[in-house]
Image (cartoon, rainbow, N blue to C red):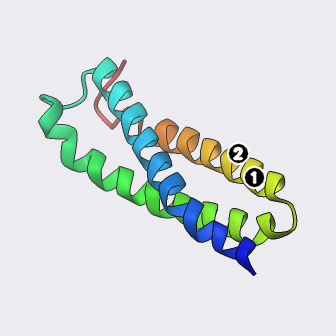
Amino acid sequence: MMRGRVGCLIAPPAGVGTGVLGAVLLNAAWRACGVGVNGAANGLALLFYGALLALFATAWWGVLVGYVGRNNPAAGLFGGLAGATVMVWVFVALLQVPDGYRC
């Protein structure tokens, strides 16, 4: 019974961490390409995109750690980490350079 509750404890911080990591990496990519006027111009977009990624990642971590982790905690953590890595990779790859900007 307690093992299922571990997903509720791990999923929110892991999901928020994934969202913050994605926003930081996207900000670094945007700075390298000179996207936007300054850092404040991109802040709202990064906040929105980071929050969206955090919601998806929290759901992913909750399902993996809460359900898969009941039977095999190592598989739940590894699956959550692998899924979060793929999410951040796709997130940065899709949003790296907006239309009109070239690196």
Task: Please tell me which residue is depicted at 74% across the width and 71% down the height of the picture.
Answer: 3
Q: How many marks?
A: 2
On screen, residue 1 versus residue 92, left or right, reads right
Quadrant containing the N terminus in the rendered view: bottom right
Label 1–label 2 contact, CB within 8 A:
yes
Name the residue that disc number 1 marks: 79
On screen, residue 8 versus residue 66, left or right, reads left
Viewer-proximal residue, 52 or 79? 79
Q: Name the amino acid, label 1.
A: Gly
Question: Callout 2: 10 Å neighbours few (<14), some, many (20+)?
Answer: few
Q: Is residue 92 above or below residue 37?
A: below
Q: Is residue 27 above or below residue 46?
A: above
On screen, residue 29 versus residue 10, left or right, reads left
Q: Name the amino acid, label 2.
A: Ala
User: How far, Cα to Cα, is label 1 from label 2?
Assistant: 5 Å
Name the residue that disc number 2 marks: 82
Most extreme residue toward the right is 71
